[in-house]
Image (cartoon, grey):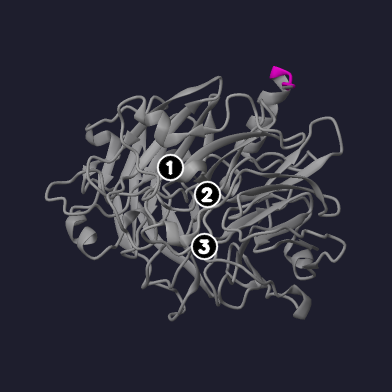
Amino acid sequence: MRRLGHSVAVAVAVCVTMLWCAAAPAQSILGYHGSPTRSGVYIVPHLTYDRAKGLHLDTSFDGRIQGRVYAQPLFWHFPGSNRKLLIVATEDDIVYALDAHDGKVAWQKSLGKPVPRSALPCGNISTLGITGTPTIDAVEEAVYLDAMVDGEGGAGPQHLLFGLSLQDGAVLPGFPVNVAATLAAQGKSFDPKVQNQRGALVVVDQKLFVPYGGHYGDCGQYRGWVVGLDLAETKSLSAWSTRGIGGGVWAPGGIAYDGRSLFIATGNTKGAQDWADGEAVIRLGTDLKPSTDKKDFFAPTDWKALDDRDADLGGSNPLPIDVTDPSGVTRVVLALGKDGKAYLLDRANLGGLGGALATETVARNQIRTSPAVYPAYDGSLVAFEGAGAGCPAGGNNGGITVLKIEMHPAPKIATQWCAAVNGRGSPAVTISDDDSNPIVWTVGAEGDNRLHGFRGDTGEPVFTGGGAPEQMQGLHAFATVIATDGRIFVAADGRLYAFTP
């Protein structure tokens, strides 16, 4: 396979990770929310508040695909050329590469037979194929993903890891990798029938990391898992799993990486009398070795009560934030729970049981989507889907809530603004090429099925969904947008939508 020159590959990776790509004609989007940190910020030159008001469906963009879609699409701009692809993975176990210019299929790859709902002990997706958002490796020009495949010869549901060439969709040498069989050869038990793969994947230092949880309904003896695959040697897997039964790593944002450590959030454990890695934010090294040092985990002191009422801390991915103010930069992690609380953690020392820097009830309902973070002069702003508990104007039955994170003179979480949206999407943010005009975008998934945009500073609506042609079909809860190449893209069942100013 052709490799990028080292300097070009590093430049692409740094550009995407740091989100300083305004000079490039199209920002490649390698993973969930545009960055390993899962920040959800996209640089879109000239997308101002005024231009956003004129957003409309791009009728020249085809975008037709086959299958239900839960994963976020990705975008790859081949260096040194005008070739641009949008990558969409479906529950039919098909990966599509669409030409970014017109939305027509450039290539597609079927990876096997998806698993029928009847073959699983519980769940709410039928049929089950590719759910977690794949990731692109800029060095290898390849996309990596987990596909749930109905195994041949009566093998039943299997989790298979695939690497595909971005050039033409060809399966790379050494793939697919059967997760259960590979772990079994190392003496580890992984039951693919009860393990689901919903969280986003990430590549770090030429190693692929994949999170696992359970199915909707919380059935079976699943655990929270993270497996690591060396892309140069695919015959073995490193792995971490929760000590207790349950504790799935199931948030759509999956694994966050801040350049030093991996961060995951876990859900409820089953029957644990002593804390066993559930309801937690956990730091992992790329070797995935477990740690019991309190600097490497956080769990609320009421973790057992959260277990008992299924109020997972792990409903939303951890969000590493570099909070910048006149006093300097403070590195923290924000966790949002189904209990409606926000937990602010010291990134260097997560604090163990009850060791949060600040805790605040920020929502009146469960938080189960991925947040996005963008800068403010004296702190950071975090947008999430939920009915705000402390909205400045009162009310808010659901939609978008934006928090202000401040570190001086003391750590503080406060509600900046709220906005109503009919639907449950994960917000993302666009910023113009001069670092101004922040716009918080979300979709009314399973609600009004429209795209919505709000001023990032005040919450004032700048785009309210457009007319009849702009209403989308087949959006699923937790769907999120990507923004690049001068447009906003939304993936839904059977179609990728493109909006243009």
Say which amino acid is labelled 1: Pro
Q: Is residue 4 magenta?
A: yes
Stretch of the chain drawn in magenta: 2-6
User: Which disc is residue 211 wearing?
Assistant: 1
With respect to residue 312, does 190 lie above or below? above
Residue at the left extreme, as displayed? 273
Q: Is residue 218 magenta?
A: no
User: Which disc is residue 115 wearing?
Assistant: none
Q: Earlier in the sequence, mark 3 or mark 1?
A: 3
Specify whether 170 is left or right of 188: right
Callouts 2 and 3 close, C-beta under 8 Å = no
The residue pinned by badge 2 equals 132
Q: Position of residue 282 (x, y in %)?
A: 33, 40
Q: Position of residue 455 (x, y in %)?
A: 63, 66
Say which amino acid is labelled 2: Gly
Determine the residue positioned at 79% across, 54% down: 46
User: Which disc is residue 126 wearing?
Assistant: 3
For numbered disc 2, what is the local secondary structure?
A: loop
The image quadrant of residue 134 is top right
Q: Earlier in the sequence, mark 2 or mark 1?
A: 2
Q: Earlier in the sequence, mark 2 or mark 3?
A: 3
Q: Quick one: quadrant of the C terminus? A: bottom right
C-alpha span from label 3 to label 1: 21 Å
Say which amino acid is labelled 3: Ser
For numbered disc 1, what is the local secondary structure?
A: strand
Q: Position of residue 174 (x, y in %)?
A: 58, 24
C-alpha span from label 2 to label 3: 15 Å
Q: Position of residue 380 (x, y in %)?
A: 49, 51
Disc 1 crowd, CA 10 A, few/some/many (<14, 14-19, 20+)? many
Residue 258 in sight in this render: no
